Amino acid sequence: MQFRPKQIAQEGASIGQALVWNGLLWVPGTPTLNGDLGSLYVSIPVITNGVGTTPVKANGTTAAIHEKNFTHTNGRLTYDGEITKVFQATAAISAKSSVGNVVLRMMFAKNGVAVSVSEQTRKIGTANDVGAAAIVCTSDCSKDDYVEVFVALVSGNANITFDRMNMVVSEV
């Protein structure tokens, strides 16, 4: 069946919006080219004190690189799109520990909950020696879902600093 442009209703879309398919219905939304993308980097390293075996948000002052349907707040990328989509999150991290012989656990968190399938480990043999790791994860994201990087240890307690980190969340 074909429809002429005069037969298509605005259905609540405002100026700058279009009707986009959400998998079930045509709904008002912002059309995107080349997919949604959010990215950030650590601009000022900050110690995350007292990291133990329970995952916590990694400290550090971050700055946005790209915000296409994402909003950056310190260490967090929040999806602003109207349509639930599948995203891939990646992060490259350089971290150090206040003590030696610790095994770092680094993972993504979605809406404040650690995503265990994204977890990677990295042993830091000597205090203040920098170790690097990359983490990757895919997940559905709906409007206002947010992604962060969490850190924990396999055992013990230490102060952890992410010296460098680049994080990208992109539509797949």
Image (cartoon, rainbow, N blue to C red):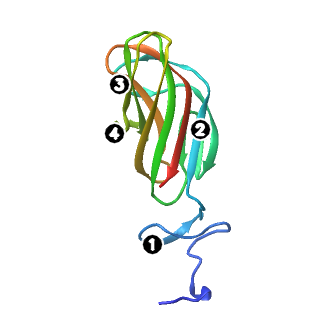
Label located before the other in sequence (1 or 2): 1
What residue is shown with label 4? 117
- 17, above or below 80, in the image: below
Within 10 angstroms of label 1, few (less than 14), some, or many (20 or more) residues? few
Residue type beneath disc 4:
Val
Amino acid under disc 2? Leu
> Which of disc 3 and disc 4 is earlier in sequence?
3
| Mark 4–mark 1 distance (CA, rounded to whole Å) | 32 Å
Residue identified by numbered label 3: 54
36 and 70: which is toward the camera: 36
Residue 10 image position (x, y, % from top left): 59, 77
Which secondary structure, mark 2? strand
The Cα–Cα distance between marks 4 and 3, rounded to whole angstroms, is 15 Å
**Sequence-earlier tag: 1 or 3:** 1
Q: Which mark is residue 40?
A: 2
Residue 63 shows in this picture: yes
Q: Are marks 4 and 3 in contact (CB under 8 Å)?
A: no
